Amino acid sequence: MLRCLAIDDEPLALRQLVAYIAKIPYLELARACSNAIEAQQYLSTHSVDLIYVDINMPDLNGVEFVRSLLGRPMVVFTTAYSEYAVEGFRLNAVDYLLKPFSFADFSRSAAKANALSALRRNRPEQPREGTDEGPSATDDAAAREREYLPVKADHKVTLIRTGDIVYLESEGEYVRIHLADRTSITTLFRLKNMEAALPPENFMRVHRSYIVNLKHIRSYIKGRVYLDNDEQVPIGENYREAFQSCVDRLFGGGA
């Protein structure tokens, strides 16, 4: 059973959260709060496993509230503003529900939290943060941020595993993300901004209109990259030298 704290300054939204929590057998409502300050006071004397928190709230917003927590529980952000998605996942949130969300969306999010909780219970004890015995919690959060890319498409935010991205293609104000399963997702985003959000050790811009995942390169010649989804993209004249240096360093050989 996961003890939940629900926080939203909108009464209707808070009532919906409470109702949804009541429908999930493994969730238990510990407290419903109408603002983050009330939630802070509750957490000073009580513990919870999972927090559902709105972002855009007066006095103390949801992001600031989560940053203030020590021994942070699992967090799911609920908001009508998709621009906060990247910041939400930088805080290692389990999920990001974009209002208005359905019970099906909520149920999938709860299932993620339940699975993560089970994983934490069953894995071996981790070394303390700050020791030289293993990765710290900060390292885990950074690794998670690099592993997933939050993308807004079709009126929702989708988490894409960066390892599943084969290449990205600029289409004016949009970017088409080509995935390993041969599907694609189109999002309103500039390629240069997408480039900044991707892990630089795995992705490289090879053309003004293309970024490739280096792990999905099958072969290359002067001026063209062949990818393991049987597609190919051009290498721009201004990118050839940097690309050649990169693949020589990573894979050896020459084009």
Image: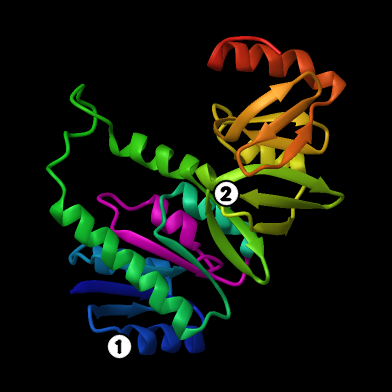
Which residue corresponds to the image point at 80% horizontal and 45% vertical from the top-left? 170
Measuring from the top left, give residue 112's x and y in whole percent: 35, 65
Question: Disc 2 versus disc 1: distance between alpha carbons?
Answer: 38 Å
Tell me the quarter of the image containing the N terminus.
bottom left
Crowd around label 1: few <14 · some 14–19 · many ≥20 (10 Å): few
Provide the residue span drawn in magenta: 55-81
Q: Is residue 20 left or right of residue 174?
A: left
Which residue corresponds to the image point at 51% horizontal and 64% vertical from the top-left? 59
Q: Which mark is residue 22?
A: 1
Q: Is there CB contact under 8 Å for labels 2 and 1? A: no
Tell me the quarter of the image containing the C terminus.
top right
Measuring from the top left, give residue 159's x and y in whole percent: 52, 57
Element marked by disc 1: helix
Q: Which of 117 and 45 lies nearest the eye of the viewer?
A: 117
Which residue corresponds to the image point at 25% horizontal and 64% vertical from the top-left? 43
Up the image or down, 22 lies above or below 96; here it is: below
Up the image or down, 165 lies above or below 1; here it is: above
Q: Is residue 115 left or right of residue 17?
A: left
Number of numbered markers: 2
Element marked by disc 2: loop
Mark 2 or 1 closer to N-term? 1
Up the image or down, 145 lies above or below 242; here it is: below
Q: Is residue 222 visible?
A: yes
Up the image or down, 123 lies above or below 112; here it is: above
| Residue 240 placement: quadrant | top right
Q: Amino acid at mark 2?
A: Ala
- The residue at which mark 2 appears reads as 180
Q: Which of 136 and 36 lies nearest the eye of the viewer?
A: 136
| Residue 37 placement: quadrant | bottom left
| Residue 136 placement: quadrant | top left
